[in-house]
Image (cartoon, rainbow, N blue to C red):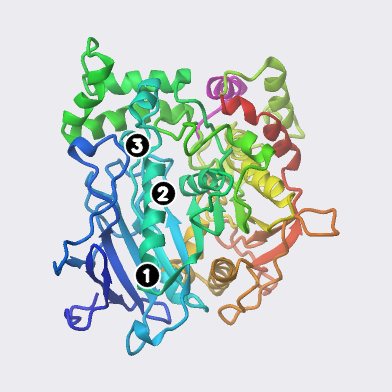
Amino acid sequence: MSAMQDSETRPRVTLPQGTAVGITQHGAYPNPVDAFLGIPYAQPPTGDRRFRPPVKVEAAAPGEEKIIDASKFGPRAPAKQFLIIGPKLEESEDCLTANVFRQAVAGGQSEKKKLLPVAVYMHGGAFNRGNAAMHDTASMVGWSAAPLVAVSFGYRIGALGFLPSSLSAREGALNLGLKDQILLMEWVQENIKLFGGDKDNVTLIGLSAGAHSIGHHLLNYEEGKPPLFHRAVMESGAPTSRAVRQPDAEIHEQQFADFLEAVKCPKVTPDSEVFPYLRSLPLEVIKAAHTKVFYEYNPSLRWAFQPVIDGEIIRQRPIDAWRKGQWHKMPIMTGFNGNEGSLYVNKQMDSSEQFTAFWKTLLPQLSDEDVAKINELYPDPTTDPSSIYKVEGPLAEKGGVGKMYKRIEAAYAHYAYVSPARQTAHLAGSQKEAPVYLYHWALEKTLVNGAAHGENMLYEVRDPDTCRVSPAQDELSRVLHAYVTSFICTGDPNGVPGDGVERPKWEAHSSNGRDKKMKMVFGRNNKEFVEEGSGGDGKPPLPAELVEDIWAKTESDFWWDKVEISQQ
């Protein structure tokens, strides 16, 4: 907000809960953006409301002229941050706030008659970290060739949002973060028209845990009950990603016990008194225990504090919902990055024994035949001359990684992200009721991490530091942003001409009359970050190309067949 912007010129929207007084942002984008930040969409989940479903925010009393200062982001949910992106936010348990962005209109919002498409962004972070401000939603809106209204928000994460166990199930305390998301979507349905948005034209968009969440809402199907959204963009995430188990799974019960020990809950505490005890604790005790337990399990990637099958939102095993056709039929955009595992796996892994032990620990239900097949699909680079997972060249000279790094990175990426995204594209697209658009982000940003998990986000929002690196990076960002905002506005990534940049037609993964499955691959031949003197012929690499979806297909098919063992 400009220091000169006073209360008289600030944008205002009157809601049932009060009048939100926002700010107008003039960033690097061509269209200024009205931003309404930190608007509560629920009552604070503190005190006796801790570890309970969210409660709708109260309306202002009749005759009360309540002013909501919507000039800054609300606090982020308590958690130890992994990647620091975006503005620094305060931390508080009172984190259930929404941020609304729209292109500013000269003369005021009343100039617009037609209600605009709406995007609701769900942030990622493994359900244990992250916040709404990591995604520069204002920039995405400000650059859009077609106007739209976008919403980002906070929801409970970590132990406060996802504390699975049999006792949690009896207490009604499962998947509280997903319930926060549902309440936010209901808030959007009730209020977004007041910002100029169309409640009947809502797209959910999210990365990683945000995309996993969207997948769960997509599969939260009940005959005759319409969804709270109409399109979905799921980036590096799916309802079948990683593990979705029953709340009383052995791993969840052990992690719950570890959490109770970390908060020093007396072992003699009756079940009926455990959650009252947890509600009585200072936030710092809860946060410290959450951090301790999460990072104890992090090396094995058996992440604590995750969504589980609750019979309410995640009604059944996600793979069963897909197979039964029990999901909301709507246009979907989804995809994966080329090196999804690089941020998470042990970069120093050096022996085949470590590689095998990792899989036996992460997925103990794997049979000996399964483990043998994994070793066949990902050949040991120290013993198999044909292995494509050798650490050699500049990576060996400068990367500082172990001999198994490329092998474990690829295998985990295919298991946790690539195969699940393909499942979404195949299973949703096979119904022919709505198109599914699949992408593959292939731009390698660093020698070690390659096309890492989440790196497309900065391109999607037209991040200025990213775009100014080179004309090729700016064009790649323009193309991706145009596809995404076009899909939000029309349900078709080709529907809006875009920001003055040509882009190839993005065909659906499964198109009528064609046997081949197709995907859009981004940045595949751009090596300017990882190879000196790349592009020496003077021809800029194509930012996007439509290609057949065959990359790592054999490996993906194997993991697809094993999805049940992660959903028990």
Residue type for callout 1: Phe
Residue with the mark numbered 2: 182
Near-viewer residue (286 or 400): 286
Is residue 383 something that shows in the picture? Answer: no
Residue type for callout 2: Ile
Taking the magenta stretch, the answer to whether it contains residue 160 is no
Near-viewer residue (149 or 42): 42
Q: Residues within 10 Å of mark 2 (few under 14, many from 20)?
A: some
Is residue 226 something that shows in the picture? Answer: yes
**The residue tagged with tag 1: helix, strand or loop?**
strand
Residue with the mark numbered 1: 101
Q: Quadrant of residue 129?
A: top left
Taking the magenta stretch, the answer to whether it contains residue 347 is yes
Near-viewer residue (382 or 23): 23
Q: Which comes sooner in the sequence, label 2 or label 1? A: 1
Q: Residues within 10 Å of mark 3 (few under 14, many from 20)?
A: many
Q: Nearer the viewer, mark 3 or mark 1?
A: 1
Q: Quadrant of residue 2?
A: bottom left
- Identity of the residue furthest to the top in this view: 268
Indicate whether 523 appears above or below 32: above
Tell me the magenta residue range.
346-362
Task: Report the quarter where the C terminus lies.
Answer: top right
User: What separation in Å lies between label 3 and label 1 (alpha carbons)?
Assistant: 27 Å
Q: Quadrant of residue 169?
A: top left
What percent of the width, then of the height, locates residue 134?
A: 37, 56
Q: How many marks?
A: 3
Q: Which comes sooner in the sequence, label 3 or label 1? A: 1
